Image (tube, rainbow, N blue to C red):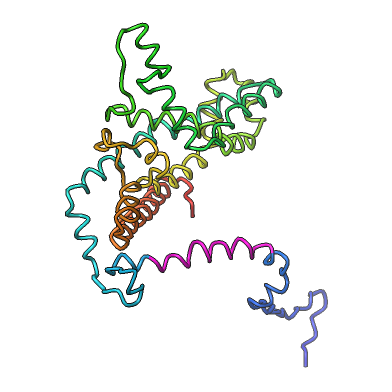
Amino acid sequence: MKQAAAPGQIPLMQETTIKRKRPNVLGRIKKDKWLYLLLTPGLLYFIIFKYVPMWGVMLAFKNYQPFLGFWKSDWVGLEHFRVFFTNPEFYMLLRNTLILSLYNLVFFFPAPIILALLLNELRLAFFKRIVQTLIYIPHFISLVIVASLTYVFLTTEGGLINELLLKYTGTKIDFLANPDWFRPMIIMQTIWKETGFGTIIFLAALAGVDVEQYEAAITDGANRWRQLWHITLPSIRSTIIILLILRMGDVLDNGFEQIFLMLNPLNRETAEVFDTYVYMMGITQGAFSYSTAVGLFKAVVGVILVLGANWLAKRFGQSGIY
């Protein structure tokens, strides 16, 4: 029996805890079935074209022979990696790849940020849209066309740049065959082609900056440079760091097509990178297992660099990719 409450005393209420049973996985899928249906095409794409082909990395540990097939080819373990690391060309490939990636980080990576900041300062919306359209166009031009334009401008046989040099200096420079000019040529192509399109992400980040911060800074007497340094850049810092972390994963990936189109026997000493080497060994010479080992080495290094860069970002209090 319940004890009656004393006069003037609030009766004690017995608390009851109701435990709600969490829906299982099938229940959650059934509840949000249309969202999962929208997810299906993208999920199938990654499974079929990204995860299933990963089984092919087993070739790096086999001596693959087409007439024997994948399963009957001999298992050689790390032999292809040993041959690759002891190959005298390994150090040339590593040097060329890292130097070109360093040039990309130093000269190309800041270019979209600077251009986005400049575009953000434009006040005429009509003029801003025209400029954005013009700088986006090069991204949609094929690299074959870019290489052809480079040849037309820089060739010693009637090239525009060399004709101007001949007119004003009396000499010509063989840009296409000189190894010293290969890296600047590649970087200039990349900056011209991709800088404008790269501003899209940073302009989207700049659009989310609170306008009241600028108004408060103007009230405090801050000029445009102070606003840029203390408001604009800190607001897009997380975006810059995330893109930099993702860029670290491509340190050994310079892009095959662009390098291949500008490569020739005269500049091979500075132009040959891992991507073109994989093509030469795998496609032209038929060393499928060896080229797979080189590609796997690139992928592993890329993953390590991404994880390391993400750890450093979190270590210094910045937001990482996960």
Is residue 20 found inside the magenta-colored segment of the image? no
Q: Nearer the viewer, residue 72 or 191?
A: 72
Task: Measuring from the top left, give residue 257's x and y in whole percent.
Answer: 42, 43
Please identify the quarter of the rendering in which residue 216 is found.
top right
Residue 175 vertical placement versus 89 (above, below)? above
Residue under the point 35% across and 20% down:
156
Task: Measuring from the top left, give residue 305's x and y in whole percent.
Answer: 36, 51
Residue 235 visible in the current orientation: no
Q: Nearer the viewer, residue 65 or 297?
A: 65
Residue 140 relative to residue 130: left or right: left
Residue 21 vertical placement versus 151 (above, below)? below
Residue under the point 49% across and 55% down:
322
Please identify the quarter of the rendering in which residue 182 is found.
top left
Residue 190 relative to residue 59: left or right: right
The N terminus - image quarter: bottom right
Work out which residue is located at the far right of the displayed protein and give it. Answer: 7
Please identify the quarter of the rendering in which residue 71 is found.
bottom left
Residue under the point 43% across and 46% down:
245
Q: Nearer the viewer, residue 219 or 50?
A: 50
Which segment did they paint magenta?
38-56
What secondary structure do most residues of the magenta stretch adopt? Answer: helix
Residue 68 relative to residue 139: left or right: left
